[in-house]
Amino acid sequence: MTSEPREDPTTAALNLTDRPKPAPIGSERELVVRKFVVEAAKLLADLHCENLVVLDVRGISDLTDYILIATGTSDRQIKGVAGQVTDLALEYSLDRFGSERDSDSTWLVLDYVDSIVHLFEPTSRAHYDLEMLWGDAPKIDWRSETKGEDQAE
């Protein structure tokens, strides 16, 4: 019995020939995208995703500015929260460029060009270890950024 090769979530959904470039650093759009990833992290935490990490890959990656990684508890949860992240992106006028998932639904990637959201089940997250791949990227403390916004209201 042969098994199909598993796709790699680090490159899934990335049609590099048609893919737009991320927003310039410091632009208004880049600020909107940062607010989106912080709010997306807060949303995922509220929806019981675990081990949320937001990486700032501006200047490190030519593909995107921010990477959000989260662990879900089941394929059903991962699919459900992906829909809610997509709805949130629309509130920020961010169109999804692409999405991809493996046949077993152990990971799902949502590509918004300026930000990429990776949702994993625990085993797949450990296998792909994106935090190590992007180990030189600074982590965004999305909890403190969220608190600061809440206190300003």
Image (cartoon, rainbow, N blue to C red):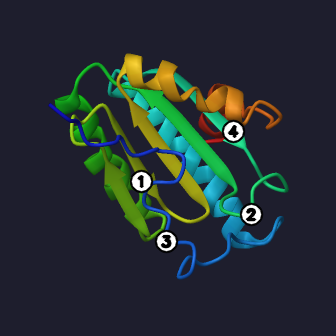
Give the residue number, with chain letter if any, for mark 3: 15
Q: Residue at x 85, y 56 (%)?
A: 59
Q: Residue at x 30, y 31 (%)?
A: 106
Say which of marks 3 and 1 sits in front.
3
Percent x, y of residue 151: 65, 33
Image side of residue 41 versus residue 107, left or right? right
Residue 60 percent location from the top left of the image: 82, 51
The image's mark for residue 62 is: 2
Query: In the rendered structure, are the residues bearing label 2 and label 1 in contact, judged by CB atoms less than 8 Å apart?
Result: no
Mark 3 or mark 1: whose residue is earlier in sequence: 3
Gap in angstroms between the C-alphas marked 2 and 1: 17 Å
Mark nearer the viewer, 2 or 4 = 2
- In this picture, residue 116 sits left or right of residue 33: left
Q: Amino acid at mark 1?
A: Leu
Q: Residues within 10 Å of mark 4 (few under 14, many from 20)?
A: many
Between 12 and 96, the residue placed more toward the observer is 12
| Separation (CA) of disc 3 from disc 2 | 13 Å
Using the image as rendered, state which of residue 145 and residue 103 is in the foreground: 103
In three-dimensional space, the C-alpha distance between marks 4 and 3, rounded to whole angstroms, equals 22 Å
Amino acid type for the residue under numbered disc 2: Asp
- The quarter of the image holding the N terminus is top left
* Residue corresponding to mark 4: 55
To which residue does mark 1 refer? 110
Q: Secondary structure at mark 2?
A: loop
Mark 2 Cα shell of 10 Å, populated few (<14), some (14-19), many (≥20): few
Between the residue at mark 3 and the residue at mark 1, the CA separation in whole angstroms equals: 13 Å
Residue 147 appears in the picture as rendered: no
Q: Nearer the viewer, mark 2 or mark 1?
A: 2
Q: CA distance from mark 2 to mark 4?
A: 14 Å
